[in-house]
Amino acid sequence: MLEIKQIQPSDTWEIRHRVMWADKPFEYVQLAEDEKGLHFGVFKNTQLVSVVSLFIENDSAQFRKFATEISEQGKGYGGKLLAHLIEEAIQQNVKKLWCNARLSATELYQKYGFQIVSESWVKDGVEYVKMERNL
Ligand SMILES: CC(C)(COP(=O)(O)OP(=O)(O)OC[C@H]1O[C@@H](n2cnc3c(N)ncnc32)[C@H](O)[C@@H]1OP(=O)(O)O)[C@@H](O)C(=O)NCCC(=O)NCCS
């Protein structure tokens, strides 16, 4: 059974760490802003397999730290979570949704209507571009 639910900030940390920044200290994935965010997770039966966090400011919102457990990637969970995130943002009256996307994720975001709106840059050895879509 598959379910997408709102979760606590701390529920996201282990997957964030394992999938995105395993070589950094655990604290690296705990954001100061986490308490102000909305966090969503995909549950496969009772196992949390994919997470994403949404940070709303006025009528625009950034999503961050989107990650699917490595053994569960490529099974459609991330796509479903992204679709849910977009619906949630619309409900919250967000007009523009954006992210700093790892280059490896840009194709997925393009499928969900996001466009690249910046040059690329590198931080901590990862190459990013800014992507956004109007809602
Ligand atoms: C980006 C990410 C969250 C997508 O989650 P996911 O659960 O794998 O997403 P989906 O299964 O819906 O796959 C989406 C697309 O990603 C691609 N993909 C990503 N990882 C893949 C994998 N390990 N194997 C196969 N395809 C993969 C597929 O091409 C798929 O495209 P499709 O819809 O045409 O099949 C996940 O790959 C991830 O955690 N990556 C590492 C962290 C990261 O880069 N996060 C994004 C930061 S901007």
Image: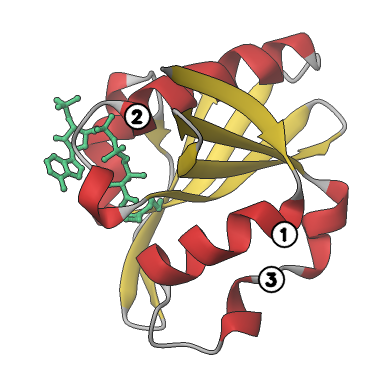
**Quadrant position of ligand 1:** top left
Q: Is residue 132 left or right of residue 111?
A: right
Quick check: is the Cβ at mark 1 less than 8 Å away from ligand 1? no
Question: Is 44 in front, or is 5?
Answer: 44
- Tell me the tag on residue 30: 3
* x then y, percent, for residue 116: 37, 39
Q: Secondary structure at mark 3?
A: loop
> Would residue 135 be visible to someone looking at this image?
no
Pointers 1 and 2 in contact (C-beta within 8 Å) = no
Quick check: is the Cβ at mark 2 less than 8 Å away from ligand 1? yes
The residue shown at (49%, 31%) is 42
Question: Is 83 in front, or is 11?
Answer: 11
Pointers 3 and 2 in contact (C-beta within 8 Å) = no
Q: Is residue 78 left or right of residue 108?
A: right
**Residue at the limit of the structure toward the front, as seen here:** 46
- Local packing at callout 3 (Cα closer than 10 Å; few below 14, some 14-19, many 20+) is some
Q: Secondary structure at mark 1?
A: helix
Q: Nearer the viewer, mark 1 or mark 3?
A: 1
> Would residue 125 be visible to someone looking at this image?
yes
| Distance between mark 1 and mark 2 Cα atoms | 20 Å
- Tell me the tag on residue 10: 1
Pointers 1 and 3 in contact (C-beta within 8 Å) = no
Q: Which residue carries the number 2 mark?
A: 77
Quadrant holding the C terminus: top right
